Image (tube, rainbow, N blue to C red):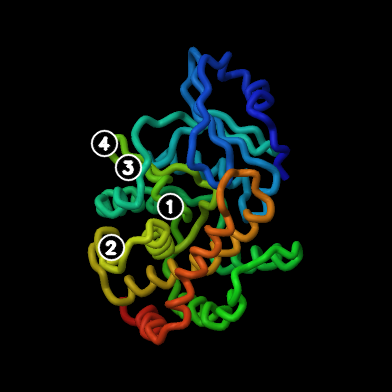
Amino acid sequence: MTSGLSLDEALQRLPRLGQPLEVTELPGGLTNHNYRVRTPTHDVVVRISPPGTELLAIDREHEWHNSTVAASVGVGAPVVDYLPGEGVLVVEFLPGRTYGPDDVAANLPRVAAAARRLHGGPEFASRFDMFEVQRGYLRIVRDRGYAVPEGYDALAPAAARVEAALASRPEPLVPCHNDLLAANVLDDGGDLRFIDYEYSGMNEASFELGNLVNESQLDHDHLVELVEAYHGRATPRLVARAELWGLAGRWAWTLWGAIQHGVSDVDHDFWDFAMERHELALPLLTSRRLDDLLDAAGGPA
């Protein structure tokens, strides 16, 4: 469990940074508090995790290791320091701008290229299985009595069919980011970078692609474009697997929002987050089109 240090307490335990000259809180984090800290010798981002984030299936030791691996292949920010057990990670500040959904849509070949660099790198320390994560989230929600969107449990049989179809012909596992919100893509005019490796782990590339498209709420044509940019082809099977993995993400991230609604001190409407994912997953999980996708996911590569 993280201890929930204040920024001043964290900086006292990071003497190598030196005396801060300027500190700016960075906007946009849904789990942590992020600060840009400039000293005479460093320009870094200090990420402080509040207590309770261990409920979200985040392993801070694995995050630290995977962040260093991502930096080694030029996709992540170089890691400067880490305080084990304290929820504090320090990485170099990378200049550039973070994306919004429209930026992702306009740069899908570049996003695919960055994903291929990451996926082709050394193995990550952990495995990320969205269905196992969902089951863990569900236990927490039930144990703690957190609210979930109405009708969520009724979708479980359809989600089980999706899991079975994806497991019938699994893809190789590669080091994945697994949480590519638009805001986790950084553009400095060169190769794109991915930031924030809390949910990183070995996974199928199709999850990365489908989850990325869904988190930016892009359409099916964008999904096909991304799959083709990544694989060099967009067969029915590859597109179906990416779409189904994206659907699994919406199914599971609904519970992430429910847990955050119960525990987080971040100023964000997490119930709205949960409802949005649920309402986006619902139509496909209850549609006849789901059968076509399940069949295609097991078809020829």
Q: Position of residue 66 (x, y in %)?
A: 52, 45
3D distance between C-alphas at marks 4 and 2: 22 Å
Residue at 48% x, 42% y: name it. Answer: 28
Task: Give the numbered dot on residue 180.
Answer: 1
The crowd level at tag 2 (other Cα within 10 Å; few <14, some 14-19, many 20+) is some
**Label 1: element kind:** loop
Which residue position holds label 4? Answer: 189
**Label 3: element kind:** loop
3D distance between C-alphas at marks 2 and 3: 18 Å
3D distance between C-alphas at marks 4 and 1: 19 Å
Q: Of the residues shown, which amino acid type is indicated by label 1?
A: Leu
Which residue position holds label 3? Answer: 192
**Position above or below: 158 against 207:** below
Residue at 55% x, 31% y: name it. Answer: 46
The crowd level at tag 3 (other Cα within 10 Å; few <14, some 14-19, many 20+) is many
Which residue position holds label 2? Answer: 222
The crowd level at tag 4 (other Cα within 10 Å; few <14, some 14-19, many 20+) is few
Q: Of the residues shown, which amino acid type is indicated by label 4?
A: Gly
Which sits earlier in the primary sequence, circle 1 or circle 3? 1
Q: Position of residue 218 (x, y in %)?
A: 33, 61
Marks 2 & 3, CB-CB < 8 Å contact = no
